[in-house]
């Protein structure tokens, strides 16, 4: 499965989101527990087709990052929208709903 991150998104992640790299995002996917689900972003102003999904993952350095992406199932690819340090509320929501 291909994971795509545009140059513009990578630039934003480096400058505005604590220096997050492509490697950090790849580690979050690799370290993810397969039994954990992905959550759907249901906020009206974030609606996409296919839907925007997210999860909280760990880098190899134990950074807890919220990874936000669109999964194009028919094309077998993931497009990263953003990624940043998960805040307490995002961690709470993910812990509550990740196994549903």
Image: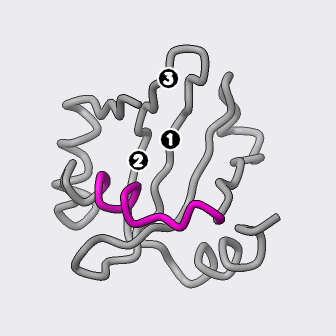
Task: Tell me: residue 30, above or below residue 74.
Answer: below
- SS at badge 1: strand
Q: Which residue is mark 3?
A: 76
* Image: magenta residue range: 25-35
In space, the residues marked 2 and 3 are separated at their CA atoms by 19 Å
Q: Position of residue 28 (x, y in %)?
A: 37, 61
Q: Main secondary structure of the magenta part?
A: helix
Give whichever of discs 2 and 1 has the lower sequence position. 1
Residues at badges 2 and 3 in contact (C-beta under 8 Å)? no
Q: Is residue 63 magenta?
A: no
Q: Residue at x 31, y 78 (%)?
A: 63
- Comparing 76 with 47, the one in front is 76
Q: Which percent across, then down, holds residue 85?
A: 38, 71
Residue at the front extreme, as displayed:
34
- The circle drawn on residue 82 is 2
Residue sitting at x 77%, y 69%: 97
Residue 71 location, quadrant: top right
Closer to us: mark 2 or mark 3? 3
Query: Residue tagged by mark 1?
Result: 69
Task: Give the percent coordinates (x, y) of residue 61.
Answer: 22, 79
At mark 3, the secondary structure is loop
Q: Position of residue 33 (x, y in %)?
A: 53, 67
Tag 2 secondary structure = strand
Residue that protrudes farthest toward the right in the picture: 100
Badge 3 or badge 1: first in the primary sequence: 1
**Separation of marks 2 and 1 at Cα, in angstroms:** 7 Å
- Disc 3 crowd, CA 10 A, few/some/many (<14, 14-19, 20+): few
Crowding around mark 1 (Cα neighbors within 10 Å: few <14, some 14 to 19, many 20+) is many
């Amino acid at each position: 499965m291909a994971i795509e991150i545009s140059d513009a998104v990578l630039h934003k992640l480096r400058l505005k989101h604590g220096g997050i790299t492509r490697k950090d995002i790849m580690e979050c996917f690799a370290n993810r527990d397969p039994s954990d689900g992905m959550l759907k972003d249901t906020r009206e102003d974030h609606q996409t087709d296919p839907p925007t999904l997210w999860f909280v993952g760990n880098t190899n350095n134990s950074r807890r990052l919220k990874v936000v992406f669109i999964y194009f199932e028919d094309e077998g690819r993931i497009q990263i929208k953003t990624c940043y340090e998960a805040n307490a509320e995002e961690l709470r929501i993910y812990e509550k709903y990740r196994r549903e």
